[in-house]
Image: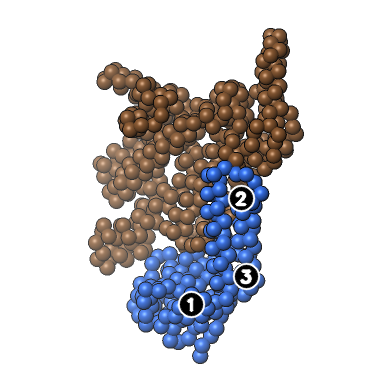
Chain colours: A brown, B blue
């Protein structure tokens, strides 16, 4: 297992490097940059002082350098005479739109995004696992049909629509506004017990909204997988030998059926962050999703690049964790085509 | 008669290269760049892992596995020996870093008397050790877990009807 861990860690390094190159190229793909557009606009308005400041920033952030040099400086591989040092040095650059360092703009949003999405993943697993097992072990029962119906409903309902519906009904029935991730009094304040509790209480609805479709999909997959597993020879033999049903179920079929659960960790993290962007806009959640959207629209390259790179790191880490868990759960050799011998 | 097996140097070259490459890319930023404190921890932790990996590869390089009718022994630093009647569990695992699960490797873990002998499939007599441990475990009526059974079947160890 340790050898596997080391092989896998070594794969992560070039992956992250390639991702950083692709991220940088993507954010540099549109012609021009935020400052060039700004300079043109200011020139047309005849604002010389602002033009000079924009040109100063262009030099400061190496936007006048060749693209390869810009990449090297962005990552922190190459030294730069300006005050910008690079990602490896913990400097994510300057947000031209917000006129503040990216670290400050992203600030708490990054942590809130991680916490919210972790809660959504936890919700997905905690709800999907027992329902999936119940549905598979009691196939074609009323409960199974009921959960199947709810599952399809969850799959077919877009998250942002669910958010709008919940916003409306919570306001109508309880007179509550479920927008935001904390009471307005705590916004911009340092972290305290009160602020943490406020975030936790505000997280419940967004967690349910963001986690619903993932939960529905997971229930369907776990049910199908467990049904396959329950029909295998070793389960039949176990039953014939008189093993207690619960022990027989927990010992191997559930363990084998957990594969899609585990394999999905890598995909869940980034898909939840990017997929929840519209929900965040609808519910006014201070997460990085809406910020990414805004920065991509305005060509705010360092802000967009940092968020994209952060999402990529999440994906790579998620894949790493899921591969480790899969190797621990199911270390079987497979024939070409994916069948297990 | 005792058979002696070792890890061929060529088979371990890949792991030595991985350890060296991993050490180079994690230590170089610490030595030549002014990195953020978080990155110092990340690179520092990773370089320690690669150092351990290099040590483990060297350990395997200097280990020989002795197999006879009485048991199995790993001779070398941190070596151990087990008689077949002391073995209480045998596990055969398959690992691959590729998505199609091709080009992987196996690891045999023989447990008993609170000690474990781990043998990688790069050992020149890996199949013989797997066969001997599977045979002795089966003769003593001990059960294999499903992944181990599947891997024995894949290797063609033991007749299919006995699994």
- Mark closer to the chain start, 3 or 2: 3
Residue at mark 3 = B11
Residue A39 place in picture, x, y as percent: 69, 17
Q: Nearer the viewer, mark 3 or mark 2?
A: 2
Which chain is disc 2 placed on? B
Residue at mark 1 = B79
Q: Residues within 10 Å of mark 3 (few under 14, many from 20)?
A: some
**Are labels 2 and 1 assigned to the same chain?**
yes
Q: Under tag 1, what secondary structure?
A: loop
Can you tell which mark lies on residue B30? 2
Is A199 located above or below residue A242 in the figure? above
Q: Under tag 3, what secondary structure?
A: helix
Which chain is disc 3 placed on? B
Q: CA distance from mark 2 to mark 1?
A: 35 Å
Q: Residue at x 72, y 37 (%)?
A: A69
Q: Nearer the viewer, mark 2 or mark 1?
A: 2
Is A107 located above or below residue B24 in the figure? above
Q: Residues within 10 Å of mark 2 (few under 14, many from 20)?
A: some
Is B158 located above or below residue A87 in the figure? below
């Amino acid at each position: 297992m340790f050898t596997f861990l080391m092989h896998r860690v070594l794969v992560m390094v070039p992956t992250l490097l390639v991702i950083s190159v692709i991220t940088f190229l993507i954010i540099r793909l549109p012609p021009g940059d935020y400052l060039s557009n700004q300079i043109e606009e200011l020139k047309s308005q005849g604002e010389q002082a602002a033009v000079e400041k924009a040109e100063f920033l262009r030099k400061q952030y190496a936007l006048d350098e060749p693209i390869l040099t810009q990449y090297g400086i962005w990552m922190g591989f190459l030294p730069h005479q300006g005050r910008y040092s690079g990602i490896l040095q913990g400097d994510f650059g300057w947000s031209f739109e917000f006129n503040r360092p990216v670290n400050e703009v992203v600030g708490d949003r990054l942590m809130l995004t991680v916490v919210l999405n972790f809660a959504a993943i936890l919700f997905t697993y905690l709800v999907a696992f027992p329902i999936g097992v119940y549905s598979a072990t009691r196939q074609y029962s009323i409960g199974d049909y009921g959960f199947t119906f709810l599952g399809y409903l969850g799959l077919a309902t877009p998250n942002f629509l669910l958010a709008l519906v919940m916003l409306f009904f919570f306001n109508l029935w309880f007179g509550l506004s479920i927008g935001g991730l904390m009471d307005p009094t705590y916004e911009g304040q340092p972290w305290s017990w009160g602020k943490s509790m406020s975030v936790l209480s505000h997280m419940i609805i967004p967690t349910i909204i963001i986690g619903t479709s993932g939960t529905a999909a997971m229930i369907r997959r776990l049910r199908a997988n467990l049904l396959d597993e329950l029909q295998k020879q070793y389960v039949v033999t176990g039953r014939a030998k008189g093993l207690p049903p619960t022990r027989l179920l927990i010992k191997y079929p559930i363990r084998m059926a957990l594969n899609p659960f585990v394999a999905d960790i890598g995909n869940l993290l980034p898909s939840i962050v990017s997929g929840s962007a519209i929900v965040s806009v609808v519910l006014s959640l201070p997460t990085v999703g809406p910020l990414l959207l805004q920065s991509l629209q305005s060509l705010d390259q360092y802000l967009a690049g940092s968020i994209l790179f952060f999402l990529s790191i999440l994906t790579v880490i998620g894949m790493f964790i899921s591969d480790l868990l899969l190797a621990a759960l199911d270390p079987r050799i497979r024939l070409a085509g994916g069948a297990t011998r | 008669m005792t058979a002696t097996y070792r890890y061929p140097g060529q088979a371990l070259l890949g792991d030595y290269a991985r350890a060296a490459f991993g050490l180079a890319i994690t230590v170089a930023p610490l030595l030549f760049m002014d990195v953020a404190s978080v990155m110092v921890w990340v690179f520092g932790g990773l370089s320690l892992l690669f150092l351990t990996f290099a040590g483990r590869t060297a350990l395997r390089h200097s280990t020989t596995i002795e197999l006879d009718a009485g048991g199995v022994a790993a001779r070398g630093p941190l070596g151990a020996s087990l008689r077949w009647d002391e073995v209480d569990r045998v596990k055969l695992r398959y690992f691959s870093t590729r998505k199609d699960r091709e080009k992987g490797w196996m690891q045999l873990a023989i447990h008993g008397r609170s000690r474990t002998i781990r043998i990688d499939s790069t050992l020149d007599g890996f199949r013989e050790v797997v066969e001997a441990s599977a045979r002795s475990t089966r003769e003593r009526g001990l059960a294999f877990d499903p992944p181990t059974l599947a891997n024995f079947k894949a290797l063609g160890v033991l007749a299919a009807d006995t699994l």
